[in-house]
Amino acid sequence: MGLPSPNVGVTMLVVDLARLLRRRFDAELARVDTGLTAGEARTLFYVWRNPGERQAMLADRMYVEPMTLVGYLDTLEKAGLIRRCPDPNDKRAKLIELLPDANPLLERIGEALQKVRSKALEEVAPEDRKTLEALLQTMKDSLLQEASREKQK
């Protein structure tokens, strides 16, 4: 009795794809000269998409540990790109706001994301792109539901 033949399967394909996308994103960020790491750029992008959100909620949304996010936010705040404001409903919580100096960087981050997306999808037929996105979203939702159930235990 031997081991079954190795099968890459969807899990390893997605893991490998995520790593390749991250590598390409890092390279594109360097090309467009944002001066930000991928984590900082991702944080800035999430703040832009979720203005005025609580810091803890932002960490959950990004699937990073709160302390990891604090490091990114510290850097972005020192650079004058974001501001942490007290939450009027909870003195312990901080709301994250984008500052105007972030706009040019967000344009460059968007350019980097578009370049990576274009390259990754260049061999995918336009009619298959929506299906691919829907399938990936379904996989993500399944994993999030499982994580939510585990948290409740």
Image (spheres, grey):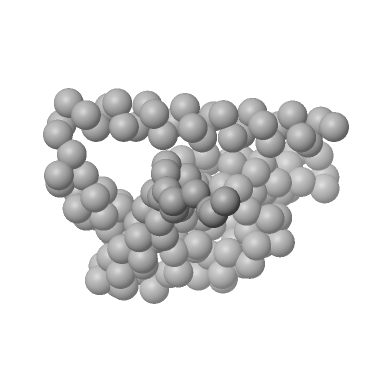
Q: Looking at this view, is 67 or 145 the one in front?
A: 145
Residue 109, can we see it? no
Against 148, residue 119 (above or below) is below
Against 14, residue 143 (above or below) is above
Q: Looking at this view, is 114 or 81 the one in front?
A: 114
- Looking at the image, which residue is at 18% across and 39% down? 124
**Residue 144 screen position, x and y as percent:** 61, 34
Is 62 placed left or right of 7 in the picture?
right
- Looking at the image, which residue is at 71% across and 32% down? 148
Number of marks in the rendered image? 0
Quadrant containing the C terminus is top right
Q: Looking at this view, is 101 or 128 the one in front?
A: 128
Against 49, residue 18 (above or below) is below
**Residue 51 screen position, x and y as percent:** 53, 41
Residue 87, can we see it? yes
Q: Looking at this view, is 115 or 7 the one in front?
A: 7
**Residue 106 screen position, x and y as percent:** 35, 54
